[in-house]
Image (spheres, rainbow, N blue to C red):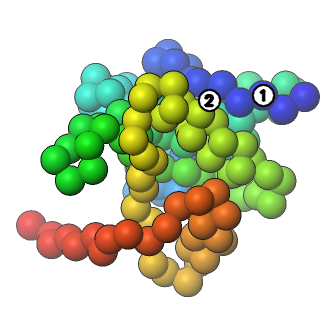
Amino acid sequence: MIEVREIQKGGTVQAAAAMLALRPRWETADALVDFIDAELRPAGYRIVGVFDGRESEALAVAGFREVRSLAWGHYLYVDDVSTLPTSRRSGHGERLMDWLAEEARRLGCEGLHLDSGVAADRAPAHRLYMRNGLRISAHHFEREI
């Protein structure tokens, strides 16, 4: 049975493998878990995962936070959406997007926002986002310092 549920602090390791598929810069589960629990969670970062009931490890995850800004008001910002390579094309991304939209409604948010890279390998993710009602509404600019 497929279950979508929030992963609390202390359980972050359940999200590590799926998150490392998207964020390999952290290299190890320990480094990723330490950063999430010590730096991101205290700032409001939360994680939701898709589980199949047989595994304690999430098949897909999304990291998100509740944000308020002058530009967009009160919204849910999705930092990360990732599925284990062996579990892709199984509807887990759709399950996460549905859960995130419902959580945004529950929190009284005006919208759901995320940024996504533009490399060719991101096309499946972009299709997922557009199928779920997201549209390209801005350019994201960056400068390394």
Instruction: Tell me the kind of residue under disc 1.
Output: Glu
Question: Is the C-beta separation of discs 1 and 2 under 8 Å?
Answer: no
Is residue 144 rendered to the left or right of residue 23?
Answer: left
Query: Which residue is at the front of the view, 122 or 107?
Result: 107
Characterize the local packing of mark 2: few (<14), some (14-19) or many (20 or more) Cα atoms within 10 angstroms: many
In the current view of this chain or complex, which residue is farthest to the left? 145
Residue 65 is situated, as x and y percent measured from the top left of the image, at 38, 36
Q: How many marks?
A: 2
Q: CA distance from mark 1 to mark 2?
A: 14 Å
Residue 106 is situated, as x and y percent measured from the top left of the image, at 51, 25
Q: Is residue 81 above or below residue 129?
A: above
The quarter of the picture where the C terminus appears is bottom left
Dot placed on the residue nearer the N-terminal end, 1 or 2: 1
Characterize the local packing of mark 1: few (<14), some (14-19) or many (20 or more) Cα atoms within 10 angstroms: few
Instruction: Tell me the kind of residue under disc 2.
Output: Gln
Toward which corner of the image does residue 64 lie, by quadrant?
Answer: top left
Query: Which residue is at the front of the view, 54 or 137?
Result: 137
Residue 83 is situated, as x and y percent measured from the top left of the image, at 67, 51
Residue underneath mark 1 = 3
The quarter of the picture where the N terminus appears is top right
